[in-house]
Image (cartoon, rainbow, N blue to C red):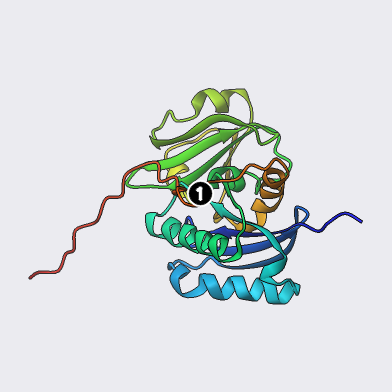
Amino acid sequence: MNKLIYILNIETSTTNCSVSLSENGHLIGLKEDNSLQYSHAERLHVYIDEVLKTAKVSKDQLEAIAISKGPGSYTGLRIGVSAAKGLCYALSLPLISVPTLEALAHQVENPKGTIVAMLDARRLEVYSAIYDASYNETRQTEAEVITLDSYKELLDLSPVYFIGNGVAKTQQLVSHPNAIFIENKLPSAAQMCTLTHAKFNDNDFEDVAYFEPYYLKDFIAIPSKKQF
């Protein structure tokens, strides 16, 4: 009988606080809150406990902890990575990371063209990566400013699926018959399962001590508007 491989997956790169549990790459538990407010600090560990309890899997049965590494919210990523590292240390488990935009791209089912996974950044900027219909990355993650001509070459060739919370600002500027805008989607731990199981089988692990989120850009603190 083949051994059951349980992996706990954590996604905190946006306002969606998401935790999933996979068994041999299949989703068997999911708990998330994709409200407009960040709730990670209060809910992440509660969700971890709830997912494991519902699936009747103990922490001792886990084979690895996986984290969505970014890009995304600086604070959200810090909370997720800190929690993942803490579990790895406490349970002596390996750490797996997956690019946030790669998992997000897998929310597009049976694509017939190119996928642009994108997260909202400042002003007219998005963090984006491009994937083909088999979810292979064809352009790495970049921070880019959306213009009227963005993705024109891709759109002229085939359908392009835009997904993520960067879609809202993109569809205000990009207009093309081949543009397919998938609205109201955030990265979720649900799509991490097959990706993290494959990495587990390949022994593709991170160095727990030195692993850092993929911020893409330096954190910039917003000055307080309070008067002193």
Residue 164 % position (x, y)? 53, 49
**Looking at numbered disc 1 in the image, what kind of residue is underneath it?**
Lys
Horizontal side of 52 relative to 38 (left or right) equals: right
> Which residue is depicted at the point 44% across and 62% down?
79
Q: Quadrant of the N terminus?
A: bottom right
Q: Is residue 165 above or below residue 227?
A: above
Residue 89 % position (x, y)? 54, 61
Frontmost residue, 178 versus 126: 126
Horizontal side of 222 relative to 119 (left or right) equals: left
Residue 169 % position (x, y)? 42, 46
Horizontal side of 223 relative to 213 (left or right) equals: left
Dividing the picture into quadrants, the one containing residue 190 is bottom right
Furthest residue in direction right, as rendered = 1
- Residue matched to label 1: 69
Q: Residues within 10 Å of mark 1 (few under 14, many from 20)?
A: many
> Which residue is depicted at the point 46% across and 75% down?
42
Dividing the picture into quadrants, the one containing residue 99 is top right
Furthest residue in direction left, as rendered = 228
